[in-house]
Structures are given as C-alpha cells and as structure tokens.
Image (cartoon, rainbow, N blue to C red):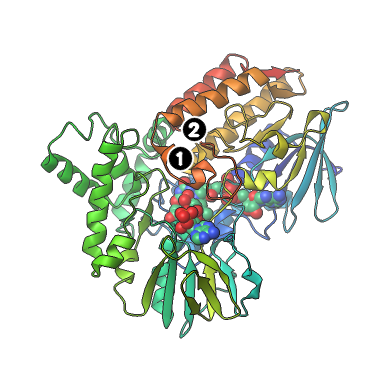
Amino acid sequence: MTDPRTVDAVVVGAGFAGMYQLYRLRELGLTTRVFEAGDGVGGTWYWNRYPGARCDVESMSYSYSFSPELEQEWNWTEKYPAQPEILRYADHVADRFDLRRDITFDTRVTAAVYDEARERWTVTTDGGESVDTQFLIMATGCLSHSKLPEVPGLERFQGPTYHTAHWPKEGVDFTGQRVAVIGTGSSGVQSIPIIASQAADLTVFQRTPAYSLAANNRPLEQGEIDEMKAHYREWRDAQRTSGFGVPIEPATRSALEVSDEERRAKYQGAWDTGTLTAIIGGYTDTLSDRAANDTAAEFVREKIRERVTDPEVAETLSPRSYPIGTKRPCLDTRYYETYNEPHVHLVDLRKTPLVGLTETGVQTSENAYDVDAVVFATGFDAMTGALSAIDIRGRGGVALKDKWGEGPRSYLGLGVAGFPNLFTITGPSSPSVLSNMIVSIEQHVEWITDAVGHLREHGLTTMEATVEAEDEWVAHVAEVGDATLYPQADSWYMGSNVPGKPRVFLAYIGGVGAYRELCTQIARDGYRGFTLR
Ligand code: FAD
Ligand code: N01
C-alpha cells in the first residue's frame, strides 16, 4: 500500500463480517484498511468472554463456507462450540489468509463524512487518523453495542461490576462470593449456571423470563465430522436457500390441524434434537398465529415445570407475556436446574422493580441485596447501536442517526439513500439476526464485492440507493413483519429494550433463501433501485 491515508475501501470492524470483506476486496485488487476497536479479530467472540458463552448454531454450520480448504482443515470439537474455540477459529482465519496486515487494531472509527464534490468519504478514528476512501463498509455488528440497565447509581456500587459483552480477558473467579446477575436473555441463561457453580450465593434479577431449550451439547464424533466434510457443498447450498440459514425440513401443516398426541410427539422429537429451529419451525403457523404458537410455548413451559422443583419458582421462570420465538429463544445447559440449588435465588423484577445499585448491592422496590459483585447480562442496543455511535454524514451533511430517528431506513439492509458507496453488512432490514449469521454475512459480503466489482468494470464511481426503492423496502419489511407475531413482544428485534428507541421491527423475516434470490435478481437487473454513476 502506498499511502495508507488514501485507500479504495475502509471496513469498520474485524468480526466475521469485516474479515471476510477484507479477504474479498483484496481479491478484487482494492487497497483496503480495516479498523477494529478491539485488539484482536473475532468481534462477538473477542468481546463476549463470559463463562458459558457459546454458539447456539451447530459448529459445522456456524463457520465460513467460502474456502473449501478451510472447511476441510478445521476441526470443531463440540456440537455447540464455546467462545474460546470460536475465537481460535477467527484467529486461525486471520492467520491463514494473512488478514492482520491490513487491520488497525485498538482503533475506533468515530466519524465518516461524505464529500459530494470528490465522491469520497473521510473516515476519522479515535487515534486521530483521517483516511480518505471511495467505499465505506460497515461491519460493525448487530450485537456489538452493549447496554446497561437504565437505573441510577450504577457507579455507586463499591465492588466490581461486569458486562457479559466486555468480559475481562483474564476471566473472573467468583469462588466464595455473593453475586448478582441482572438479565436473563441468552447471555444470562448461559452464564448463570457457571457463575452459580462458583459463587457462594447467587441472586438472579429477572425482568422477563426467556424460553430456553436444553442444548444437549456434546463432543462431535469423528464419524459425523467426516460425513459433513464429505458433503459440505450440498449442506452449504441448503443453508443458503433455507429460511433461517439452517437447513430444516420445511413445515407443511398448521399446529392446529393435527391431534394433540401428534403435536406432542413432534415437539418432543424437536426438543430431543437440542436445536432452536426444530420447535419453532415445526409448523407453518408457529410464528404467525397465537393459538398455534401457544401449543409450542406451553410445551416449553411444561419442560420448565419438569426441570424446576419449586412450582412458584418454575412459574416465575415461565414466559407468558409474549409468543415463543418472538424474543430470541435460548439454548441452555442446566439453566433451570440451577434454580433448584439452595444458594441460588430468583427475584422477579416485574413484581419488585429494579431501583438501582447501592454502595453494597442491588436495590429493588422492596429489598436491598448485598453482594460482592454484579454482572450485567443486559444485552445490546441492537442492529442500529454501533452504527449510530459513529457520526456518519452523507449528502448535505445529513447524519445517519438523524435520518434513522424514526427507525432505520435502508434498501435491502445494504445501502442507504443519501449515503453513496456506504454499505452495511447485515444491516437493519436484512435477515441478519434472524439467521445463522455467518450465512447472511457471506451473502452480503459477496453481494457488496460484486457491486464494487461491477462499478469498477464499468468505469463507474458511485452507487446509491434511491429514495423510492428504500421507501418500498422499508414498507415491505414492515408488512412482512406485521404478518408475524414478532411485533407482539417487547424485544431488541423491535428496538423496545432501549428506552426511547423507535419501536420498529429491525430485521427482515422474508427468509434467507428468498432474500438472497431477490438480491441476486436486483444485481442482475443492473442493481435495480440503486443509482450508479
Ligand atoms: P461482530 O462480531 O459484532 O463484530 C463487529 C466488530 O466491529 C467488533 O469487533 C467491534 O469491536 C467492531 N466495531 C464496532 N464499531 C466500531 C467502530 N466504530 N470502530 C471500530 N470497530 C468497531 N449468531 C449466530 O448466528 N449464531 C449464534 O449462535 C450466535 N451467538 C451469539 C452469541 C453472543 C454472545 C452474541 C453477542 C452474538 C451471537 N450471535 C450469534 C450473533 C453474532 O454477533 C454473529 O454471529 C457474528 O459473530 C457477527 O459478526 P460481525 O462481524 O457481523 O459483527
Ligand atoms: O441480551 P438480551 P443478551 N432492568 O437483550 C434484561 C445473542 N446471543 O446479551 O427482556 C432489568 O437478550 C432484559 O430484560 P427484558 C442473541 O441473539 C446469543 O442476553 O428486556 N432488566 C433481558 O432479560 C441474543 O438474543 C447467545 O425485560 C433488564 C436481559 O437483560 C442477543 O445476543 C448468547 C434491563 C437482556 O437480554 C442478546 O442477548 C448470548 C433493565 N433496565 C447472546 N435491561 C447464544 O446462545 C435489560 N434487562 C448463541
């Protein structure tokens, strides 16, 4: 690279999206710089080092498909790999493809401003660097901007506090301590059993219970690894055309048209697989009809009652306020059983709301709980948080976060009107978080790379979504979302976990396969809905 301050492309983020985007742009011959706030690659798997962090998509599916050699040489050890193994995989990919030399670590992008006359972006970092680039590709992650509970006095607490998404690299030993965990989404569900196994006393503060299914995690056997490796190409093709990036037998019947016995047997079979999609994808109407959904929800509540000995605790842990699947369900290992242990206590924040932290612990409307350490498993300002944290200014100096003041507006979750040559990998309004994310990441990276290649081949310099295409897409995303039960939940999918955030369905539920086909067709039509110049 001649002058690192002037490049063809800047990529923000070095998780699975940023790494693959760099690889592809290099292949295309573009000079590219990647900026990453952390001091290593891996994104989610670099930051979320909390005890129990692991994937809930099977390892041999949750991995890159772009390199058959990589697929063949890497050996996953577990059905659901833990964070250290996934981080080792990310590191291996970075080394194998020599990615690090174009990544500037420990550096956060703070602003990006489009210069209309020059048709280029100026990207600024917290290290004081300014980089001039033609293309700006955001690989900032859907679940990378963490949030704390919105209560006063968090700083008052005198002991250590931890957020699951910023876990210390050296780990934390809770042996002999009294610990509070606030939050019972996926991060809480995964970490609580392990924190409980160390702590002398654990109090869990729950606002909304999760639907969690037993993961039945286990080591992979050599035979199944060999079998998958022998048929990887077919499997990858099936992933790409599936609804959620995980091939499952498509449902053909309503949950309400079969007998109770048949439905139960099906749910039990699905439960035994220890996968997220089997129960939710078992019938055509689980995610669109509340009565159908209730049959699956009740099956899971029954399992909770079987797993928790105290009926009152079981009831507190049983979700009733939203349909199953409309907040992301969890996969767990001994989550519910943990509440059978005498040193583990559950506080229902719906009955006694969280008031704040004191010098010595957690305060609810009824009680003070003295603890030695507090863990926030309180999640993320999802989908838009990491993008809105950067001062991105397009045509006329318009700020992206202002344009998105009433909810994100984007065409395909890939491009934004008024922001030429800005691309968002797994951006809002794409299937992204409603899928095995590596499948969606690869699809977006490949589409963006093809688009950039197309511009170059045709001597063009800019590409920008039209307002009309964007409006139509936003309306379509909302319409498809409204036909489902998702809007019935207060979830991060709806932006409603962050006070003041507009309540908009943030992802596209039209299906990974159908969406891919549409994107491909749009490209074939000369990038219909984009203006190319
Ligand atoms: P990320 O991995 O989030 O990487 C984004 C990177 O951008 C981060 O490293 C961040 O530091 C960097 N960044 C952001 N803003 C800036 C900035 N301004 N300047 C510089 N750098 C910046 N998905 C699944 O499909 N299956 C799973 O089982 C699954 N499990 C998950 C478990 C956890 C605990 C979490 C939090 C998420 C999980 N996900 C899962 C979603 C997961 O985020 C994606 O699968 C995938 O790792 C996202 O990759 P990414 O590169 O798009 O984003
Ligand atoms: O975050 P969450 P997460 N007062 O938002 C509670 C992926 N992921 O980090 O539901 C009190 O799900 C909040 O309560 P409520 C996955 O996509 C995957 O756990 O808003 N409580 C909730 O209980 C997942 O969905 C894995 O009422 C407050 C919890 O904190 C996504 O990341 C593992 C509160 C937050 O749950 C996010 O998961 C981990 C407040 N002010 C993550 N604010 C896998 O297993 C929040 N809460 C693959």
Residue 20 appears left or right of 83: right
* Secondary structure of residue under mark 2: loop
* Label 1 crowd (10 A; few <14 / some 14-19 / many >=20): some
The residue under label 2 is which amino acid type? Tyr
* Label 2 crowd (10 A; few <14 / some 14-19 / many >=20): many
Residue 455 quadrant: top right
> 169 above or below 98?
below
Image point 76% across, 19% down: which residue?
Answer: 460
Location of the C terminus by quadrant is top right
Residue 148 quadrant: bottom right
Image point 75% across, 55% down: which residue?
Answer: 107
Residue 376 appears left or right of 56: right
Location of the N terminus by quadrant is top right
**Residue farthest along the front direction in this orientation:** 366
Residue closer to the observer: 349 or 323:
349
Image point 51% across, 36% down: which residue?
Answer: 505
Residue closer to the observer: 108 or 209:
209
Does residue 87 show up?
Answer: no
Kindly identify which residue carries mark 1. Answer: 434
State the separation of the CA atoms marked 2 and 1: 8 Å
Residue 195 quadrant: bottom left
Q: Are marks 2 and 1 in contact (CB under 8 Å)?
A: yes
Residue 19 on image: x %, y %: 62, 46
Residue 43 on image: x %, y %: 59, 53
Residue 23 on image: x %, y %: 64, 41
Q: Earlier in the sequence, mark 2 or mark 1?
A: 1
Kindly identify which residue carries mark 2. Answer: 508
* Secondary structure of residue under mark 1: helix
The residue under label 1 is which amino acid type? Leu
